[in-house]
Image (spheres, helix red, strand yellow):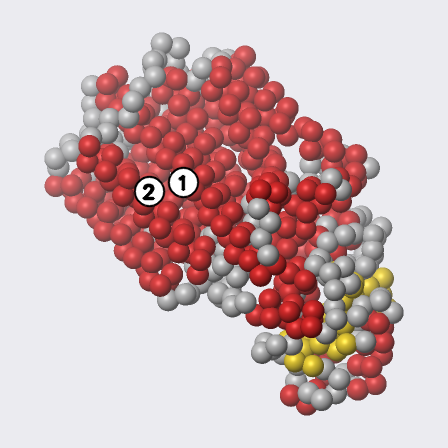
Amino acid sequence: MTRDLSSSAVLHEPEVDLQAAAPERAALTVRDRWLIAAFWFLALALGAVAAWVFRHNMGSDGISYLDIADAYREGDWRNAINGYWSPLYSWVLALAFAVYTPAPYWEFPFVKLVNFFVYTGALACFHFFLLEILKWCRRQRDTSGGAGALPAWTWITLGFSLFIWTSLRLITIDSVTPDMCASAVVYIAAGLLLKIRRGAGSAGVFVLLGVVLGFGYLAKAAMLPLGFLFLASAAVAAGGIRTHVRRLILSLGAFLVVAAPFVVALSLTKGRFTFGDSGKLNYGWWVSGLPFNDWRGDPPGSGTPLHLPRKLLDHPLVYEFGSPVRGTNPLWYDPSYWQEGMAPPWSWRGQVRVAWHAAESYFAILFRSHGGLLAVLMVLLLNAGSAPDRSRRVAALVLLIPALGGLALYALVHLELRFVGPVVALIWMALYLLADTRSHHPRDSSVRGAGSVVTIIMVLLLVELSGRLAGGKSLHLTANWVTPMTDSHWQVASALADHGIQPGDKVASVGGIGTAYWARLLRVRLAAEVHWAPGFWSSAPEAQRRAIAACRTSRAKVIVSSSIPTWANGTGWRRLGTTDHFGYFF
């Protein structure tokens, strides 16, 4: 008789006795263990090369995380609690800098070393997840009398290759962001879900799941809503809410216990309940179309600004923001302060635009980068001869609920591919769980061919990745503007120091404030900005002099600009080192 495929059957009829199941070992041969060791070596080698090749890379987000780490180290809690940037990655950086403080020249390379260790931790978390898949497959064989078609070596090749590709091509080690920390959380949580599904879900496992999800929120605010999706998956994995209601309550309680202290601290700092303003601000910027750093209440209906950068001049536009926010770049140190009061209006045009961009990005991953994996998956499903059994459907569903929820969440607000690295790996692993059915025979030619093709596809992806590293090319899949940096920002910092600029001084910038990484190296504070560089250089000489005078009122000791027009040489601007940066000293 055909099984009931309804959703109620999937969610409320557990196939195995979850209470009686005993801990199991993954069925690994000596060859499998050597293969795992080889992939560990490959992953660490490629990660180390990436960390070194891009050792001088930095982003404006990274500067903010470094500044917040300094605030935590100094015990400046008022400035450390930040409404936009989550705390966990800054804690990691603060701990690393407490252990060893490098010279300014080596600060950015040291951050890449820290990222490499975070990447190694994420690799260990993925290893745990992959072993849980193998254990689940073995349990299926032992309890149902049938074996899946794909051998362990295929799962190992597919899994580790996906981890390396998504971690180094989507997230990347050179991104000084918490996304690698979040990926570690996702992999541990996914492994715990499979552990629950195969019957090893003790009370301790449920509590650990909640703790892990709590740290996920501390890594990224978006992990708070995703945490509830993981808990929903835990209910599915356990066979329904009624089956393990007490353990699910324990998991939820552990989640809230870990997350609540920062929510309380942040809410007290802001004077209102909030678990983070990054979602609201990104919605306003990307969906509602509100300006990034110069929102002043327009258009009507977008809220009333409470803290505005002080406008010193209208033409060219000059802002001053030297206080009260600390940091190298106060405007980006805490955007939630400067844009307090924003109430982004809903925009159906913006919503369609953002969703379309996300769909294009997901299509690029599915059909361009991983089209071969999709083709092999379709072959396996078409040759299965029957639909995947209920147990495989549930196991896949347990992984797909949070993974697809993550894709949908970012598609509604703002997507950068580094956000979705781990969920892309989860989706492929879940889909191949569906395709690895008992109706296959491991010795079928189609199955043997599928395993070989998967291996070839992943090897080609890793070869392409290695080639980009060898050529010093950007590893970012779509962000072509990200290119390996030299030590040019150190040269700018050194040249400014030679001209008498000291740590703690205030400086100004002509545009490009988000790329003023030299300011962090010299430990100076950006206090003013000529908002739009092309508008400044195209304005009349008298207007330029007014803008320079306005910057001087901010107590800035120098204005720094990059790529100034040729005619500006000799008009008071001095080249800084051998770079394309110039300084106008007061």
Residue at disc 1, secondary structure: helix
Q: Residue at x 69, y 72 (%)?
A: 498
Residue 82 appears in the rendering? no
Split into 4 quadrants, where in the image is the C terminus?
bottom right
The reply to whether dot 1 and dot 2 touch (C-beta < 8 Å) is yes
Image quadrant in which you'd find residue 199: top left
Instruction: Give the camera-side residue of 555 and 105.
Output: 105
Indicate the secondary structure of the residue bearing disc 2: helix
Q: Quadrant of residue 429?
A: top left
In the displayed orientation, state which residue is furthest to the top: 20
Horizontally, residue 234 falls left or right of residue 323, namely left
The three-letter amino acid code for the residue at tag 2 is: Trp
Task: Name the residue that disc number 1 marks.
Answer: 123
| Relative vertical location of residue 284 with respect to residue 260 in this rendering, above or below | below
Above or below: residue 583 compared with residue 528: below
x 64%, y 30%: residue? 259
Q: Residue at x 80, y 48 (%)?
A: 341
The circle drawn on residue 492 is none
Please tell me which residue lies in front, 294 or 11: 294
How far apart, in angstroms, are the residues tagged by discs 1 and 2? Answer: 8 Å
Which three-letter amino acid code belongs to the residue tagged 1? Leu
Q: Position of residue 154 (x, y in %)?
A: 24, 39
Mark 2 crowd level (few <14, some 14–19, many ≥20, 10 Å Cα): some
Q: Which mark is residue 40?
A: 2
Front residue of 294 and 104: 104
Residue in view at x 51 percent, y 66 percent: 485
User: Where residue 495 sits: x, y (%)?
Assistant: 66, 73
Which is nearer the N-term, disc 1 or disc 2?
A: 2
Q: Quadrant of residue 471?
A: bottom left
Relative to 568, is 579 on the left or the right? left
Residue 247 seen in this snapshot: yes
x then y, percent, for residue 89 = 59, 43
